[in-house]
Amino acid sequence: MNANTPAKPRLTTSAMIASIASEGQRVRAAPFGKALAALGESRPDIVGMTADLSKYTDLHIFAQAYPERFFQMGMAEQLLLAAAGGMAKTGLTPFATSYAVFATRRAYDFIHQVICEENLNVKICGALPGLTTGYGPSHQATDDIAMMRAIPGLTIVDPCDALDIEQAVPAIAAYTGPVYLRLLRGNVPLVLDEYDYQFELGKAKLLREGREVLIIASGMMTMRALEVAGQLQKDSVGVSVLHVPTIKPLDEETILREVKRADRLVVVAENHSVIGGLGESIASLLLRSRLAPKFLSIALPDAFLDAGALPTLHDRYGISTESMSHRIKNEL
């Protein structure tokens, strides 16, 4: 290299952990790790465990605060969750972290038989849920909800933003029983503080009102739904947004009440495969309740997805704000 040629800037953030935040969007760094470390001060029963991914699940913050309560299990997800079950039997409350694909696909039998069949108090926290990494099918957890919904007694939580995570951590710690948390990590967008929001386990929350469309969403797709509502407002289309942070058990009462309130297009938006997720769960609920509104599912396709930059992938697979707005307009 010529001495006068400026060196290329060194990359300090892996594409694996790239934030889903838009440029200039408000964020909070590592809300899960900070919330768990804060909770650990008053809850000596809480232990942190990971499969060689403490930094990439933000658990390193808890590990630095309580090194004697942190357990690095190596790249062995089955061992991680089997050990978490054993610790729960002694009265501890393990928060076990890994990437969502590894925690669910590689350790499914251990979650099913060791943890959930015995209703053990283990909190499984899976980072990179849905299409939140561009690394392709090996790391994109697009089928995790479908797998975990099938396990009896397992609570499933899909937070929208940093505030949701901060409030969900103490809530799931206070709940006795197994929980699967879809974990957004790193610089996580902050949006729900503008809506007087309070997380309640098992409860859906209406964030805004609109007469023409009702979007029912979970996870980061609630953020997208709020952005879509703002865009469609400019075209005089009113959009209600119902956030469903708890996928199982589903808040059927609130969902049915909102669907019945008006003759609106009902849209379910989720960062998950169209197979086995929130959309199918709500469609089943409506059918069982003999309701037949105009219905649109916005979800990832039943396919192995491409690798690439997240904005490109979100446009390609229909979960970007622009793609959602276009599909909803076409349905009206």
Image (cartoon, helix red, strand yellow):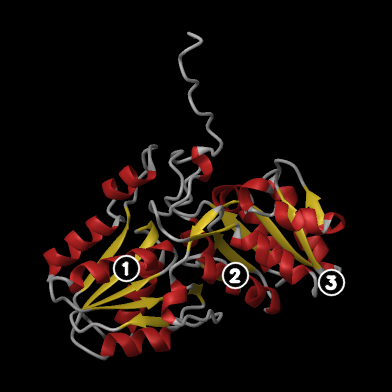
Residue type (three-letter) at the residue carrying disc 2: Glu
Residue behind mark 3: 91
Residue type (three-letter) at the residue carrying disc 1: Ala
Q: Are there few (<14), some (14-19), or many (20+) residues within 10 Å of tag 3? A: few
Q: Is residue 38 left or right of residue 32?
A: right
In this view, 290 is above or below 298: below
Q: Which one is in front, 115 or 239?
A: 239
Mark 1 residue element: helix
Q: Position of residue 103 (x, y in %)?
A: 61, 52
Q: For residue 280, which quarter of the picture?
A: bottom left
Callout in the foreground (2, 3): 2
Residue under the image location 32 percent in, 68 percent down: 225
Residue behind mark 1: 225
Residue under the image location 62 percent in, 69 percent down: 179
Q: Is residue 50 left or right of residue 90?
A: left
Residue behind mark 2: 166
Query: Visible in this render: residue 12?
Result: yes
Residue under the image location 44 percent in, 39 percent down: 136
